[in-house]
Image (tube, rainbow, N blue to C red):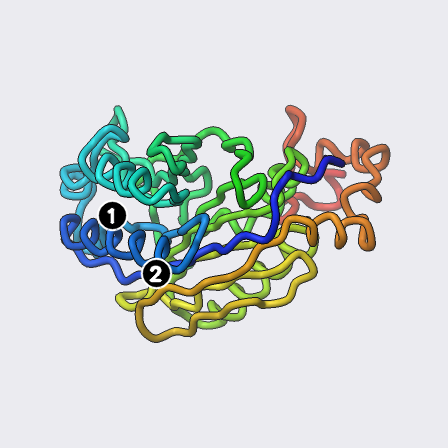
Amino acid sequence: MGVVSSTTIRRVAMVQFRSSTSKEDNLERVLRYIDEASRDGASLVAFPEFTMAYSPEEQDAYALYQIAEGIDGRFVSSIRERAKVHGIYVVVTMYERGEEGNRVYDTALLIDGHGSIVSVYRKIHLYDALGFRESAKLLPGSEIAPPAGISVGRLGMMICYDLRFPEMARILALLGAEVLVVPSAWVQGRMKYEHWQTMLRARAIENGCYIIAPDQVGNIYIGHSMAIDPFGTILVDMGGEGEGLSMVEVDVREVYSVRSRLPLLSNRRMDVYARYADAMGLTGSKRTGDSTSTADM
C-alpha cells in the first residue's frame, strides 16, 4: 500500500457508447474507438457495460445466451488483436456463456498492449432492484478480481450496480487499487443521475483513488460517463446525449498525496469494527437490520 507505482501522468480514454442489438456492429465501432484512443495518445481505453450488445427487456435468457461467447471467441479475440496492434490497454465487457441454465456472466476484461488478458471480472452484484431482475438472464460472479499493475497504475474493476456496495471498492483499495474502472449501463429514472454522481464521488473520496466510469447512453441509459480524481473532483462528465470518446489524465502520485493528507484507509478502527461482525454478516448469525426488532438484539 505504501509503494507508489512507477508511473508518470498517463492519458486514459473513456468511451460513452450506445450499444445496438447487433454484436457485429458494436464490435466494429469498438475497434474504431480503440484506433481513435491510440491516435490521441491514450495508455488505456475503457468501454461501458453491455458493450457486446444491448439486451432489450423482451429478449429472453436463451436468446441472450445465443449472442454470448466464451472469452476465447471472436469478439474478444478481435479486440485483443487491435490492442496488440496499438500497444494499448483495453477494458471491455462481454456476455460470457455460463455452464448452467442458458444464462451468461456480465464479464469485464482487462487486455494489455500485447493482446493478453490480464484480468477477468464477472459481476457479482446483479441488478435485482427498482423493477429490474438481471438474475433472470445473468449469472452472478463469485470473486473480486485483484487489482492489476499496468502503466496507468494498479487497476481494479467493478461493474455498474457494484457501485452501490461500498465494501467492494474498499476491498479493492485495500488490495492496492489506485484506479477503479467501473463499466456501467446506468438505467434512467428518478434520482438516478444524482445517485450515479454521488456514489462515484463517494467511492473516490472514501478510498482516495481515481474512478473511471464509462457509461451506456441512449436506449434506457443515462450516459454521463465520468472520471473522478482521488479528492472527489469531477474531471469529466460526458453528458446525457450522444456517444463519444473523452480523455482524462491520471497521475498516481495524486493518489498518495490525497491519502497522506486525508488518511482514511489508515485511520480505520478495525479493533472496533471487529465487534460488529454479526451485524455485518461476517459470521454465521447474519442480521438484516430492517427485519430485526430491538427485542431480538
Q: Residue at x 69, y 54 (%)?
A: 254
Question: Measured along the vertical axis of the image, is residue 199 above or below residue 289?
Answer: below
Residue to which mark 2 is pinned = 216
Does residue 288 appear in this view? no
Tell me: residue 99, above or below residue 293.
above
Q: Position of residue 63 (x, y in %)?
A: 14, 43
* Left or right, residue 22 beside residue 227: left
**Residue beneath the point at 43% across and 56% down:** 41
Q: Position of residue 144 (x, y in %)?
A: 51, 33
Q: Amino acid at mark 2?
A: Gln
Residue 161 shown left or right of residue 210 in the figure:
left
Neighbour tally class for label 1: few under 14, some 14-19, many 20 plus, Cα within 10 Å: many
Depth check: 164 or 101 in front? 164
Distance of label 1 from label 2 (alpha carbons): 12 Å
Give the mark nearer the N terminus: 1 vs 2. 1
Q: Amino acid at mark 1?
A: Met
Query: Where residue 54 appears, x then y in whole percent?
Result: 23, 54
Percent of width and height locating residue 264: 78, 48
Name the image quarter holding residue 138: top left
| Residue carrying label 1 | 52
Characterize the local packing of mark 2: few (<14), some (14-19) or many (20 or more) Cα atoms within 10 angstroms: many
Which disc is residue 40 wearing? none
Instruction: Classify residue 30 as left or right of residue 295.
Output: left
Q: Quadrant of the N terminus?
A: top right
Q: In this picture, is 37 found above or below 292? A: below
Image quarter where the C terminus lies is top right
- Could you say whether the residue bearing mark 1 is in a helix, strand or loop? loop
